[in-house]
């Protein structure tokens, strides 16, 4: 029996719950859990003692029971209602003339709350829209602004690597990524190859970056000149895996040299370069509203 259970909901939303009754759950079971002023239904995603290290220090909501057939039928009915609610909200967005893109709708299992997810380039005053939706459905309404990377996370998919999207499978939060990350790893600045399904630079550009930086800091920057016994050569590339620099002489001959070997020669540094940024960091403020 496990004290903590991780449950996944629609949109790959994951949360750890306490299991005080010590139900013998296994991965794939559907469960009813405590929710915000009600109940919700999700699928057991992870069990085990490691969850005790992943959980926050805040008081955890509890798992109430295992879902039965009637619960699963109600969940299916909610999914159909979400399709209708999406169209209703989309029409009301047009009626109010709001510049926002509706992304998804999620019913809380007990039907006491509906959450509408949207993206927008700028801050949107959607107070009248919330009132309109609350009057229509007579339940709690939440409008939640998300970023384009959050949108990809909700719908899932596969990257060019053939694996499930990192944001869907294990990433808990997003970190800023700029073209400087690609330059430091000597990747061609091709937006089509560097962008994920969300249209932003791929999160995996950050994974090996610390290793690259650790190796690169041992060497002079690219275009630095090294005065050797054979003449002056220019650093063309750093091979981070062999930890060698590739140098080119004026006659187009190439040699390899380690960082330690370079210290035995005179080094002429190039003019300082301006740091590069792709401007793709998500800085737009996200909004939430409840009614």
Image: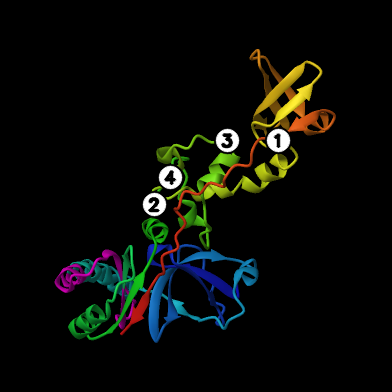
Question: Which dot, 1 or 3, sits closer to the camera?
Answer: 1
- Which of the marked residues, 3 or 4, is nearer the chain's N terminus? 3
Question: Which dot, 1 or 4, sits closer to the camera?
Answer: 1
Residue 245 or 13: which is nearer the viewer?
A: 245
Q: Which residue is mark 2?
A: 198
Residue displayed at 57% across by 83% down: 59
Q: Residue furthest top?
A: 251
Gap in angstroms between the C-alphas marked 2 and 3: 23 Å
Q: Which residue is mark 3?
A: 186
Residue displayed at 67% across by 37% down: 221
Counting from the top left corner in percent of width and height, residue 115 is at 32, 74
- Which of the marked residues, 2 or 3, is nearer the chain's N terminus? 3
Which element carries disc 2, helix, strand or loop? loop
Counting from the top left corner in percent of width and height, residue 211 is at 68, 44
- Which of the marked residues, 1 or 3, is nearer the chain's N terminus? 3
Q: Work out which quarter of the rendered image holds the C terminus and state it.
A: bottom left
Residue displayed at 14% across by 72% down: 95
In terms of image quadrants, where is residue 232? top right
Q: Answer above or below: position of 40 versus 252.
A: below
Q: Answer above or below: position of 163 versus 265.
A: below
Residue 269 numbered tag: 1
Gap in angstroms between the C-alphas marked 2 and 1: 39 Å
Residue 106 magenta-drawn?
yes
């Amino acid at each position: 029996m496990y004290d903590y259970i991780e449950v996944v909901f629609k949109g790959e939303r994951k949360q750890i719950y306490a299991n005080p009754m010590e139900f013998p759950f296994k991965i794939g079971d559907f469960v009813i859990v405590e929710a915000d002023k009600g109940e919700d239904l999700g699928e057991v995603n992870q069990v085990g003692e490691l969850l005790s290290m992943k959980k926050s220090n805040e008081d955890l909501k509890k798992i109430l029971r295992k879902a039965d057939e009637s619960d699963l039928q109600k969940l299916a009915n909610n999914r159909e209602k979400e399709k209708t609610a999406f169209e209703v909200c989309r029409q009301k967005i047009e009626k109010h003339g709001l510049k926002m893109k509706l992304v998804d709708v999620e019913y809380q299992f007990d039907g006491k709350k509906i959450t509408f997810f949207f993206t927008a380039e700028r801050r949107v005053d959607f107070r009248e829209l919330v009132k309109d939706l609350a009057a229509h459905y007579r339940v709690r309404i939440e409008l939640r602004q998300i970023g384009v990377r959050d949108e990809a996370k909700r719908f899932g998919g596969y990257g060019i690597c053939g694996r499930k999207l990192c944001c869907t499978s294990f990433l808990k939060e997003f970190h800023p990524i700029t073209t400087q990350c690609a330059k430091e790893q000597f990747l061609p600045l091709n937006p089509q190859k560097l962008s994920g399904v969300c249209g932003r630079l791929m999160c995996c550009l950050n994974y090996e970056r610390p290793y690259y930086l650790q190796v690169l800091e041992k060497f002079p920057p690219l275009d630095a000149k090294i005065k050797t016994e054979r003449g002056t050569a220019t650093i063309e590339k750093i091979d981070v895996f062999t930890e060698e620099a590739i140098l080119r002489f004026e006659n187009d001959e190439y040699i390899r040299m380690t960082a330690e070997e370079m210290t035995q020669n005179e080094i002429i540094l190039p003019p300082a370069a301006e740091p590069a940024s792709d401007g793709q960091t998500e800085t737009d403020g996200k909004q939430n509203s409840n009614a």
